[in-house]
Image (cartoon, rainbow, N blue to C red):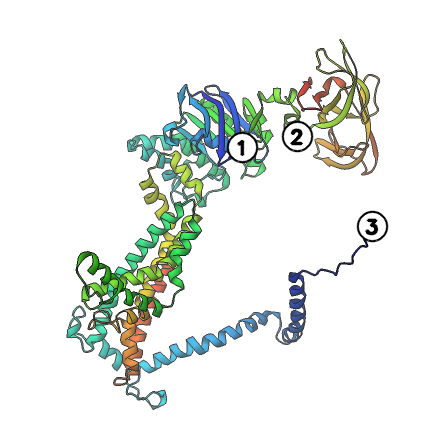
Amino acid sequence: MTAISMKDLRKSYGSLEVIHGIDIEVQSGEFIALVGPSGCGKSTLLRMISGLEPISAGQMSFDDQRVNDLSPAQRQIAMVFQSYALYPHMSVRKNLSFGLENLRMDKAEINRRVDAAAKMLAIDGYLDRRPKALSGGQRQRVAIGRAIVRQPRVFLFDEPLSNLDAKLRVQTRSEITKLHKQLKTTMIYVTHDQVEAMTMAQKIVVLNKGKVEQIGRPLDLFERPANLFVAGFIGSPRMNIYPGKVVSTGSDGVTLDSATLGRFLVPGAGIDAQSGDDITIGLRPSHLKLGPTTPGAGGGTMTVEQVESMGHETFVYGRTGQSDELTIVHVPGHFEAETGSSLAFTFDPVFAHLFSSVDGRALKGARI
Amino acid sequence: MTAPASVAPPVVARGERLGEGLDAVMRVAEVPMAALQRLLGAARMPYVFILPNMVLFTIFVFVPVGLAIAYAFTGGTNLLIWERPYVGLENFKALLDCGSYLEPSTCRYNLFWTAVHNTWWYTLLNTLGTLFFALVTALVINRLTRGRGFFRAVFFYPVLLSPVVVGLIWQWFLAREGLLNGFLTDWFDTRIIFLLEVGWSRLWVVYVSIWFHMGFFMLIILAGLQAIPRDIYEAAQIDGTSQWRQFWCLTLPLLMPNLLVVTVLLLIRSVQVFDEAWVLTNGGGPGTANTFIVQFIYQTAFSPDLRLYGLASAASVLMGIALLALTLSQLWLAKKAQV
């Protein structure tokens, strides 16, 4: 088990800096996920951890040992690639043993490790096949097996599930989580899929444009996003965002006025806002309810544009006033509404997230 | 006061005009094609489209091949086939009449077997040499981060030259009073008659051929190298694989389909060697040191004092059988090597 420390880590291509000073501490045996939109630098950061990408500045340590200048093999990491990166001309057994042969390991020990990993991943029936004779899921397990047999200090996963179908993705997700519990090795997992990050990781690092936006437990990010970016990125469907103004502040909370949501009091002490401040209000789709506004609650009306029913839940998309963005309401169970019809919605202000309209930083989180 | 607005002429993009022109041509061409399709039915139309090519192919390939086979069974010096007597397998028997195939002087047509021996050695050295240098060059160019396109073009450039030009350039370079001997005289006070000494002339024929054709094969290998996914090498790097083992265990096996194509093409081309070697060595010299099979066929058929069309055709047929065997082996090996 290995702890990883990244201090002011930077990566530049010529004069273009793409990773702008990242500080992350990964505890020994921890499973962390790096998430962010395409081009945010998460894969580059993973490759810097692996040693495949040189570090331009800053320090990376494994258990207090500086590894900046060590090769991937010297770092004793194992990586599972998005494309699996299996050796296509070798059998599954050879794919698993190839790395161990490089270490000039005893043949009996290689066979023992390969057989154990193959059994653990249920690929022991395909050891003599070549990768092209395997399904996507089986290939992925071979790639994981290749990582396991080396008994690395750290496992790195680069979007390993993105080539699998939805059902297999859910299955492999739980297998990787189980594997982490079994091996207790430090794992760093890159994904753009926040559901993967939320369900698998103990800690999530949200990246945007080569910077860390927030690090925290999955539920912390959901309940208390540090800024508008994290609020918009974590949670599916995204958080509803509305402009508003602070009318008054008091010990019981702040009173807000919004063209869409009306006037309401957001309870809570110590909210960093002054009367007259412009403010951004965030509400999760699951915190909006269809129905007329009740006293003390906020609410508005929307014109229905689209209804997505999944059977056990429904998402209603509608337009509110002048807003460019659609309001999304989560309705448990099946629900039907005519496109163009008008629906009232309401919410409990205790669930409102507040953000500064100036820099997007969070002024208040929400209770779930 | 505001300036009067000028009326700009309508701008029509050149591409747009070209498109309209092509549309008009297609509309005209469509009329007979539509009529033909009504007459023959849609299923027969593909044959109509390949007909012009097949006609040319028949005239310039099938008919000459058929004629060559027919000539191989005839004798005499008459050119017109209906004036030539049928001799059965006589020409083949004459060519294959040997005391020992390893010793051309024991053969009835010892020049044919000298040419076969010369072609065999040339094919071996040229194939191995070109393969080696094309592979090394492709590996080096593949690793370049800058100037890859430039060097690819530099190495490919000789392929664009005419074989006769290549032969003449190198003859000028290697001649008794040539550039290389000028350099040797100035710096080492020595002179080598490269093209008149058997060993040297054979070496230079192979070298010039490698220089001439390497770019083409290098490009095929380079394409193969670039088709190997980068992440396989990254996985190998993480596995702690040494550079040499990466080359031996990953690059070479994954490149095998390309190397196979290159090898068979090289074998076929080597067996067909003629023009640049003929020009470079002034007709296969010194003596018969650089006389190859195609030159034997050419001289046997077209030398004014020989005109043995039947014998030349029989030699062509034998060479054709050898090339067919090489091509079939390529297809078989390529199928086997598919990853």
What numbered label is drawn on residue B2?
Answer: 3
* Mark 2, other Cα within 10 Å: few <14 / some 14–19 / many ≥20: few
In the image, what residue occupies the spot 75% across and 27% down? A242
Dot 2 amino acid type: Ser
Q: Please provide percent x and percent y for residue A265.
A: 79, 16
Residue A53 position (above or below residue A281): below
Q: Which residue is identified by label 2?
A: A236
- Determine which quarter of the picture holds residue B108: bottom left
* Left or right: residue A107 compared with residue A71: left
In the image, what residue occupies the spot 60% across and 29% down? A195
Viewer-proximal residue, B195 or B115? B195
Residue A163 position (above or below residue B271): above
Dot 3 amino acid type: Thr
Q: Please provide percent x and percent y for residue A96.
A: 38, 36
* Mark 3, other Cα within 10 Å: few <14 / some 14–19 / many ≥20: few
Viewer-proximal residue, A30 or A247? A247
Dot 1 amino acid type: Gly
* Left or right: residue A145 compared with residue A359: left
Which chain letter goes with mark 3?
B
In the picture as drawn, the residue positioned furthest to the top comes out as: A251
In the image, what residue occupies the spot 58% across and 31% down? A209
Which chain letter goes with mark 1?
A
Q: CA distance from mark 3 to mark 2?
A: 56 Å
Kind of element beneath mark 2: loop
Kind of element beneath mark 3: loop
Residue B55 position (above or below residue A257): below
Q: Which residue is identified by label 1?
A: A41
Quadrant into which the C terminus of chain A falls: top right
Q: Contact, CB < 8 Å: mark 2 with mark 1?
A: no
Q: Please provide percent x and percent y for residue B313.
A: 31, 79
Tell me if I can see residue A368 in this picture. no
Quadrant into which the N terminus of chain A falls: top left
